[in-house]
Amino acid sequence: LRDKTINFCKGCLACQKTMQCVINDDANAITAKIGQADVVVLATPVYYYGMCGQLKTLLDRANPLFPSDYRFREVYLLATAAEDEADTVAGTRVGVQGWVDCFDKAELKATLFCGGVTDTGDIVGNAALEKARQVGKNI
């Protein structure tokens, strides 16, 4: 999402009728792809015990999916953080679960967390990376 232009939701709810957001930016194309995906995998660094702002903004902009016949049934969360405590990802999981709960046919299947990741390359050799690969192979 780093290179995408995704503006904040205006809360106008026009998307509930048109199935597309009135804001013309990259969120419309991404949301359309999410709606057609068999599985959704969300990845984020944990900032202040929550998901990054870019992901939160995108999830807010996914409003057009609510009244649609979205395809996905499974959602997976991948998260990294500098802190290595198991509960570091709890707030992020709650935020993503709140989004998933809005989709009756979907469920958050797994959360994979890798702590102790501060710099580029810190994740190399971490057991959580291999676990993520295995989960990916089984999807």
Image: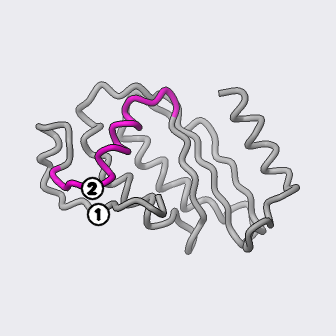
Tags 2 and 1 in contact by the CB under 8 Å rule? yes
Q: Is residue 40 above or below residue 120?
A: above
Determine the secondary structure under disc 1. loop
Query: At x 79% / y 65%, what residue is drawn?
Result: 121
Q: In the shown orientation, is residue 113 left or right of residue 63?
A: right
Q: Is residue 35 above or below residue 81?
A: above
Tell me the amino acid under the disc marked 1.
Asn
Q: Quadrant of residue 16?
A: top left
Q: Position of residue 2 (x, y in %)?
A: 48, 63
Q: Position of residue 37 (x, y in %)?
A: 45, 30
Earlier-in-chain disc, 2 versus 1: 1
Determine the secondary structure under disc 2. loop
Tell me the amino acid under the disc marked 2.
Asp
Is residue 124 found inside the magenta-colored segment of the image?
A: no
Q: Position of residue 132 (x, y in %)?
A: 73, 43
Q: Position of residue 100 (x, y in %)?
A: 43, 42
Q: Quadrant of residue 20?
A: top left
Q: Which mark is residue 7?
A: 1
Which residue does the numbered mark 2 point to in the structure image?
A: 25
Query: At x 63% / y 40%, what residue is drawn?
Result: 110
Q: Is residue 33 above or below residue 5?
A: above
Query: At x 56% / y 74%, what residue is drawn?
Result: 48
Q: How is the image coloured?
A: one colour
Q: CA distance from mark 2 to mark 1?
A: 7 Å
